[in-house]
Image: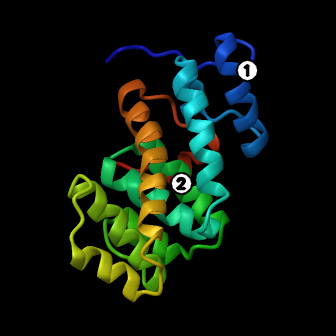
Amino acid sequence: MANFPVYTLESAPEGSKPGLKWLAEAFGMVPNIAGAIAGSPKLINGLTGVFQQVHGGNFTEAQVQTLLLTNAVTNGSTWAVAFHTCLALKEGLSEADVHAIRARRLPADEKLAALSHLARTLIDKRGRLDDHDVASFTAAGFAQALVLDVILVSAASTMTNYTGSVANPPLEAMFQQYAWQG
């Protein structure tokens, strides 16, 4: 496997420092995945732009974490599963719902289940949702236009999940208890 560096705020390429600084402020640290992404100033700055839209959008933080965790599991991104498990629990998802998503099952909460199902379907079908997929989502009380926001969250996940799979950054000690193997 190629050895990709995990940059810090001090060691990152100049063009990556604004994005890393923004993420450090958002998380109180520079996550190792962001340090790996910083090898590409374009990617880290693209991620921060998408990240701002995802977390300032129409979903609650618990719903965002449901989507991000589902995407990480579906994409088989071990680093992202651990990270989003921690954040999902912090945002109030039940341990049972988090465990269900990690086991590729749906959460018990109806709205979270609809989000998780749509996210997984979107990835599995490579974006080719059909009317039934959209109808299942809207039946849970979501507006049809929010399907597009699920695509936005998927875009953020693609950047981090794929980087995690390619660069394989080490999992921080604070996330070790949430380690996951697909």
Mark 2 = which residue? 84
| Rendering quarter of residue 117 | bottom left
Q: Is residue 8 visible?
A: no
Identify the residue at horizontal 38%, vertical 88% (top origin).
Answer: 139
Q: Nearer the viewer, residue 139 or 176?
A: 139
Mark 1 residue crowding within 10 angstroms, few (<14) / some (14–19) / many (20+): some
Mark 2 residue crowding within 10 angstroms, few (<14) / some (14–19) / many (20+): many
Amino acid on which disc 1 is placed: Leu
Identify the residue at horizontal 42%, vertical 72% (top origin).
Answer: 115
Q: Which mark is residue 52?
A: none
Q: Position of residue 178 (x, y in %)?
A: 51, 53
| Rendering quarter of residue 128 | bottom left
Q: Earlier in the sequence, mark 1 or mark 2?
A: 1
Identify the residue at horizontal 36%, vertical 27% (top origin).
Answer: 166
Q: Which mark is residue 9?
A: 1
Q: Nearer the viewer, residue 169 or 138?
A: 138
Q: Is residue 168 above or below residue 71?
A: above
Q: Is residue 49 above or below residue 129?
A: above
Amino acid on which disc 2 is placed: His
Q: Is residue 171 visible?
A: yes
